[in-house]
Structure formats: C-alpha cells, structure tokens
C-alpha cells in the first residue's frame, strides 16, 4: 500500500489507482453489492478492508492533493474519497466544509453510512458537530438528512443529547415532504431517511429505554417509521423480552 503514499498526485497516479481497484475486485462481492446498493455509479467490487487500507496509505501522503485528482467514476472511488476526507488533518470547521461539499455526490445508503460513521472527530467536537447536524436534518436533500441522522445515532446517543435528538427525530418523522416526490427528492430516497430515523430511535430505545418509551407513547412518529423501528427493536439481541412485548403492544394499539 505504500505505493499510494504520494505527495504530488497526477493523472498517471489516478490511472494507476483505477487499475489497482480493478485488480483487487471480487466478483461475488460485486454481485452482492449490486443487489443491496442502488447507485448510478459503477461498482467494481473491492471489499471495505482494502478500501480502508488504501485510504490510510493515501493519508500518509498529500491527501488534499489526492482529492483534487480523484474523480467520481465508481462507487469505490467515492467511498475512498469520503474516508480520506473523514481523516483529514485539518481543523473541524474546515473538515465540515469539505464534507458538506462531498455530500452532494452521495446517492446511496452505503456511502452515506460508511463515510459518516468514519467521522470520529464528531466525538471531540460535539457542540460544533451538533450545530452542523441541525443544518443537515433541515436540508431538502434526503441524503444530507440521512447524514445528520446517522451522525446522531453514531456519536450523540448520550445523556447530554438524548432529549434533543429525539425531538429532531420527531421533526423528521413529521416532515411531510418526505412523502412527496419532486425534482430533487424521490420516495425511494425518502425511504432511506425513514429507515435511518427508525434506526436512530431503536438505538435510543436500547440505550435510554425509559426516555424513549415516553417519547414513543406521545404518538408523534409516523406509522411507517414506527413499523420500521418496531422491527428493528424486535430483531435486536440487546432488548429484553419484556421490552419487546411492550413495543409489540404499543405498535398494535396505535390503530
């Protein structure tokens, strides 16, 4: 991997990178990815451990120069760029500016979740990160909304933010535009917003069951999201039998 520790990225290096991705593709993994990831970008089929090692090597060189040279021709390139961005050695405000621009190329849940989960600097910049998350969940871009949701469930389900993120979850659930397709948003994309919101609530339920129960009993979560989060809670090995019965009854009594 040291061959990608490059300080002066040029077009020849990018061509070499594309060939490396092709050489390290796995046909079965490619076919699996094509089934579960709906994207307009071609899928090469390189497994994530290799992508992460590649990103680590690039970060040892001139990573910002790499970002200028690397294009968006395959799913793997986009994931690679996102992981490199998430680990850039820049101040948090600069990182968010770069990441915010990157969000515009996201068109699937895999890129959204992998890259957002890689932004560990949110843990050391909770207040600044929270302000940014609020801009995400107020966006009209469904993938940017999902970025905000995934960031909350990955880095903010704690005693300080639990009440705040549940309120944001409620607001997202009541966002009527998520049910209406238009030029920028489609019902297909909005499904992934609702699914991530359900995932967020289920994580809150596991970690803060009493607060989450009161929240769910308010009845302000739309039925589709509630159905999704019920399924997630029932499938979890971290939820007690009593709490699973509680969520079954709560869902049943919504009608």
Image (cartoon, helix red, strand yellow):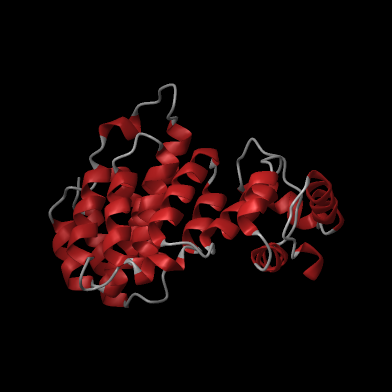
Q: Residue furthest front?
A: 8
Name the residue rendered at 29%, 60% in the picture. Answer: 128
Query: Could you tell me residue 153's position as x and y percent?
Result: 36, 62
Residue 247 visible in the displayed image: yes
Q: Residue furthest top?
A: 183
Query: Could you tell me residue 34's position as x and y percent?
Result: 69, 46
Quadrant assignment for the N terminus: bottom right
Query: Could you tell me residue 251's position as x and y percent?
Result: 25, 55
Name the residue rendered at 36%, 53% in the picture. Answer: 149
Residue toward you, 245 or 65: 65
Looking at the image, is 250 positioned above or below residue 245? above
Looking at the image, is 69 positioned above or below residue 160? above
Query: Could you tell me residue 73's position as x and y percent?
Result: 71, 39
Residue toward you, 201 or 116: 116
On the image, which quarter does residue 122 sit in? bottom left
Name the residue rendered at 37%, 70% in the picture. Answer: 123
Residue 244 visible in the displayed image: no
Quadrant assignment for the C terminus: top left
Asked whether, in this view, residue 123 is left or right of residue 74, the answer is left
What number of labels is visible? 0
């Amino acid at each position: 991997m040291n061959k990608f520790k490059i300080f002066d990225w040029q077009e020849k290096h990018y061509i070499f990178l594309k060939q490396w991705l092709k050489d390290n593709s796995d046909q079965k993994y490619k076919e699996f990815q094509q089934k579960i990831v709906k994207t307009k970008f071609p899928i090469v089929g390189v497994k994530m451990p290799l992508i992460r090692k590649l990103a680590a090597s690039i970060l040892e060189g001139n990573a910002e120069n790499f970002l200028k040279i690397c294009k968006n021709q395959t799913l793997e390139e986009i994931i690679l760029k996102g992981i490199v961005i998430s680990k850039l050695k820049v101040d948090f405000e600069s990182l968010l500016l770069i990441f915010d621009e990157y969000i515009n190329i996201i068109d699937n849940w895999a890129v959204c979740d992998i890259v957002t989960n890689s932004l560990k600097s949110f843990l050391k910049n909770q207040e600044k990160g929270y302000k940014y998350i609020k801009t995400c969940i107020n966006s009209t871009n469904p993938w940017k909304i999902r970025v905000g949701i995934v960031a909350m469930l990955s880095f903010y389900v704690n005693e300080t933010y639990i009440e705040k993120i549940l309120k944001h979850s409620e607001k997202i659930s009541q966002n009527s535009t998520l049910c209406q397709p238009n030029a920028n948003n489609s019902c297909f994309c909005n499904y992934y917003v609702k699914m991530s919101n359900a995932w967020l609530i289920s994580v809150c339920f596991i970690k803060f069951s009493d607060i989450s129960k009161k929240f769910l009993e308010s009845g302000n979560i739309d039925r589709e999201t509630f159905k999704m989060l019920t399924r997630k809670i029932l499938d979890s090995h971290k939820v007690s039998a009593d709490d699973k019965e509680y969520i079954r009854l709560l869902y049943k009594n919504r009608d």
